[in-house]
Image (tube, rainbow, N blue to C red):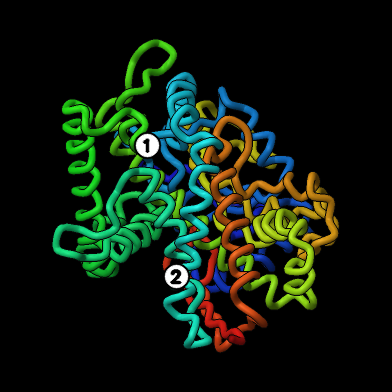
Amino acid sequence: MSDRRTQPQKGFTEVEFNSEPFLTDFKKIYEGMHASGCPFAHSKTGDHYAVASHADIMDILKQYDVWKAKYGPALNYLESPGVLVSVDPPEHTFEVRIVSSAFSQEVFDAMIPDMEAFVNEQIDKVYDAGEADLHELLSIELPLFVIFKLLGFDRYDEDGGDRFLWTRDGIIASVGLMLVPPGEAAAMIESGNIEQVRIQALTRTSELFVKHLTVSKEKLASGEWQGDENLVTRFLTTPGPDGNYLSDDKIIGFMGFLLTAGSATTTIMLSNIIYRLLTEEGAWEKVKSDRGLIPIAIEETLRLDSPVQGLFRTNDVPVELGGVQVDKDTKVMLLWAAGNLDPEVFDDPMKFDLDRDLSKVKRHLAFGYGTHFCRGAPLARLEGDVFLRVIFDRLKNLRLNGEVEMDKRMPVLQGIRKLPVAWDQ
């Protein structure tokens, strides 16, 4: 997979997705791609193409027999077995059926009281101070709390260490490598371009997965735990349609995938919602006074500030893309965030508008589309709903209280790193 497969093309925008200019002005770049009439891009450094048009992204996602997930959603070519976003039917179908039985709306809804209690407890810790970094206080903490609870992880290790801290570091390290060209990740680690604390966090997180799987098997065997104790015990006791069970490697893969995809993206969504509501004139009071607008506030934020820039597909046969012949096994990035700004689909796409038709806004691609549509979308929406309702009830006259800092450590994601706020007591 080392031979160069792409080259600059007439009409294609040249974009380096890891570069500072892109990370600072990606929405302007997307606007320009749409306005040019050729919504395609090329990355020389990454050796891949990218697609910004909503219609073209949808078309690719519908061609299941051509555009494959088997080499993974990142720029590198995945060699080891993946899960969900890294596999195709029929393997994907098998995994989805098992996950669906363990990742149900009933399971999610049962967590609402725990989520509400957690958000309230976090606010209680800082309420008297009248100010906090809401990103650190809630946007990071709530999604990790939810995923840990679903997987059956204890927050604190045997020595009292907070696992939220180092699993978050591990997530930043792994997601931060998604747009690194194949073969360069190891060199970056060796040269110290990736903080060693994050590499160590990745190792500790992997060890946590293995230990938790072992303990889950032991407690199932002894009868101390039942099959519905947590997601891991459900995976261990739920057969697929052919009677087979997920392998240990697959279950460990699911733990890593759910921890990363289920927390990092929701973290970004939560802070983006608060930022939008506090910076768009009248939006905060409008939604606070009419809680029925919470769903449109969530969906419009997901559309305008999609947490994931995009993910990759790889063509199984030679294809044509924007009039260009594309060799087999070429990485092509489907730009969810750009498709969500497509003026052919969304009127005045750069505007945050709480009066949009909810059903039309839900055409956004923040959760993907089709076979690989995010199975955790209902959970993310539920977390957003609980998060907003408790904050509306608890934090009077919420307002920004300092400089909001964007997070550029994970180029495939777009989000906030610091969200200082204050409130009246």
Q: Residue at x 54, y 66 (%)?
A: 415
Q: Residue at x 62, y 56 (%)?
A: 385
How far is the residue under mark 2 from the one under mark 1? 25 Å
Q: Residue at x 52, y 59 (%)?
A: 116
Closest to the observer, 371 or 60 = 371
Which residue is denoted by mark 1 in the rendering?
231
Q: List x then y, in percent, for residue 27.
A: 66, 65
Name the quadrant containing residue 235.
top left
Which disc, if any, is residue 122?
2
Q: Residues within 10 Å of mark 1 (few under 14, many from 20)?
A: many
Q: From this viewpoint, is residue 230 visible? A: yes
- Amino acid type assigned to the residue bearing label 1 in the image: Leu
- Amino acid type assigned to the residue bearing label 2 in the image: Gln
Name the quadrant containing residue 277.
bottom right
Q: Residue at x 46, y 37 (%)?
A: 85
Helix, strand or loop for disc 1? helix
Closest to the observer, 57 or 110 = 110
Helix, strand or loop for disc 2? helix
Which mark is in front, 2 or 1?
2
Q: From this viewpoint, is residue 327 visible? A: no
Q: Quarter of the image for the N terminus: give it.
A: top left
Q: Is residue 199 above or below residue 257?
A: below
Q: Tag 1 or tag 2, which sits nearer the N-term? A: 2
- Classify residue 280 as left or right of residue 422: right
